[in-house]
Image: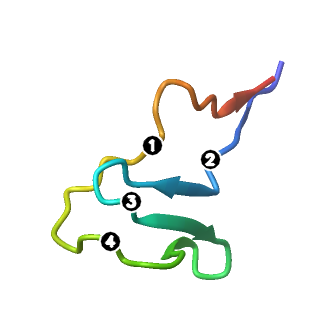
Amino acid sequence: MSVTITPPKERTCELCGREERWDDEADGWRIADEPGNVYCIHDWDINGSFVPLKE
């Protein structure tokens, strides 16, 4: 039995609204549009409802 971990491809800060998308070429997150509050301690919307495991 094998399990595949699927990471999120996009995320949004619940405090300032900053949106980011995963960039495979850069191997990192990129800001989608507006940077939001650059001093925000980002609270990403990746929580218990996101299931990264597939059987």
Q: CA distance from mark 1 to mark 4?
A: 15 Å
| Near-viewer residue (17 or 24) | 17
Q: CA distance from mark 2 to mark 3?
A: 20 Å
Q: CA distance from mark 4 to mark 2?
A: 23 Å
Q: Are marks 3 and 4 in contact (CB under 8 Å)?
A: yes
Between tags 3 and 1, which lies in front? 3
Q: Which residue is disc 3 drawn over?
A: 17
Which amino acid type is marked by label 3?
Answer: Gly
Tell which circle, 4 or 2, labels the residue nearer the N-terminal end.
2
Q: Which residue is disc 1 drawn over?
A: 45
Residue in view at x 69 percent, y 43 percent: 6
Between tags 1 and 4, which lies in front? 4
Where disc 3 sits, the SS reads: loop
Sort mark 2 into few (<14), some (14-19) or many (20+) by Cα contacts within 10 Å. few
Numbered circle sitting on residue 36: 4
Residue in view at x 45 percent, y 43 percent: 45
Question: In the figure, 14 relative to 16: above or below?
Answer: above
Which amino acid type is marked by label 2?
Answer: Pro
Q: Which residue is disc 2 drawn over?
A: 7
Q: Residue 39 appears in which quarter of the rendering?
A: bottom left
Which amino acid type is marked by label 4?
Answer: Gly
Residue in view at x 20 percent, y 62 percent: 40
